[in-house]
Each structure stands twice: as C-alpha cells, then as structure tokens.
Image: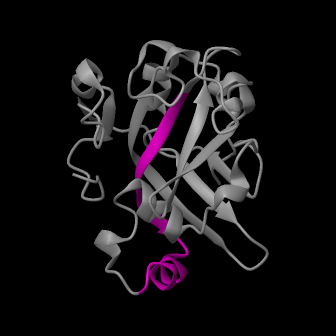
Amino acid sequence: MNSTIKKDFFLKPALQLAKELLGCILVHRTDELELSGMIVETEAYMGPDDRAAHSFQNRRTKRTEIMFHEPGFIYTYQMHTHTLINVVCGEIGIPNAILIRALEPVDGIEKMIEFRKNQPISNLTNGPGKLTKALNITMESYGKPIWLPPVYIKEGIKPEHISSGPRIGIENTGEARDYPWRFWITENKFVSR
C-alpha cells in the first residue's frame, strides 16, 4: 500500500518538487469512496520573480495568502468556471507553488466519468480544471494540508523519463511564458498537451 507523503517532502525548491510530484498519487477520499490519479504533469510558479505567478513581486492578497505560509498546504483558485489545485512549496515567506496540471486516473474512474458528464477516460483528467472536476476537488480545500485526508498526496512510482517545456496559458507574462517550468511524464497519454 502506498503511504501518505509527509509534510517535510514539500520543503523543497519549486523546480525540484514539480519533478518529484510526478508519479505521486493525488487522492480525494470521501465517506463513500476514494477518487485518485497519478500526477503526470505539473508546473512550477516561482513567486516574487515570476511574472506568471499570482504572487509576483510578493503580491499578498486574500487569495495568495496561503502561498506565504508553510509548504505542503493547498492553494486552490478559480479560473473561469474551474477550480485549480496547487501545492505550496519551499520556504515560509517565499510564495512558490506547484500547479497540478494532469493526472492518470487510478481509483474511482466510474465516479469520475459521472462528475465529468460521461467524458471518455482519455479526457477525464488531462487538464487542471478537468482533474479537479473529476476528483470533485473544490475551493473548500484552500489552506488545508495536502499530507492529510480528505485531499492528499501519497507515494506512487518514480517516472523513468521526465520532459520539460514552457508553461501553458500564460501568454501575457513577458519572458515568463518561455520558462521551461512545465514537467510531465514523457509519452504519458494523459498529459494535457
């Protein structure tokens, strides 16, 4: 059985943690069932110096407040009609986070299909808004520890090959749009693109 990842795992620089999360399992456990997927794609956001980060120039708002706290807490936010899930990482006071971009479905696939309105398995979790809908992760997870249920990360596999490239959907961020801070398990069919 895969064990839950401990709190100190998240006390790492964002670029390192973004790669080390690949192959781990994101779980949402409810009273009724467990929904989970293997993390296959992430993006690192490097806070104060990263124009694509919500915390660029140490911008501290009600929304970004959790990013300035301890690593290992969940930073959720809404984009259009989607909730996106991030993991705060690094040192306290330096607002870095990892966006979980895509999962490979593992447990509770039938329920994920229901939550995603009968989408095919290949389209259930291959994007940050899709995966939160499939696992029924909402804004209620904001500020909660990602090493404890109901939404938590547990050990998975160590990917053989990891690819990297520019992050997605950040066209208006100057040079930051070209930083190769998106990481994915090479040739995994559930990667967003």
Left or right: where does residue 158 sit relative to residue 120?
right
Is residue 61 shown above or below 155?
Answer: above
Left or right: where does residue 12 sit relative to residue 16?
right
Residue 17 place in picture, x, y as percent: 50, 26
Which residue lies at the image location 79% right of the left edge and 75% below the top edge? Answer: 31
The scheme the figure's colours follow is one colour
Q: Is residue 163 visible?
A: yes
Residue 106 place in picture, x, y as percent: 48, 65
Which residue lies at the image location 66% right of the left edge and 31% below the top edge? Answer: 61
Whether residue 158 appears in magenta in the rendering, the answer is no
Residue 81 place in picture, x, y as percent: 47, 65
Q: Nearer the viewer, residue 156 or 21?
A: 21
Whether residue 113 appears in magenta in the rendering, the answer is yes
Residue 43 place in picture, x, y as percent: 39, 35
Q: Is residue 179 visible?
A: no
Count the labels in the image.
0
| First to last magenta residue range | 97-117
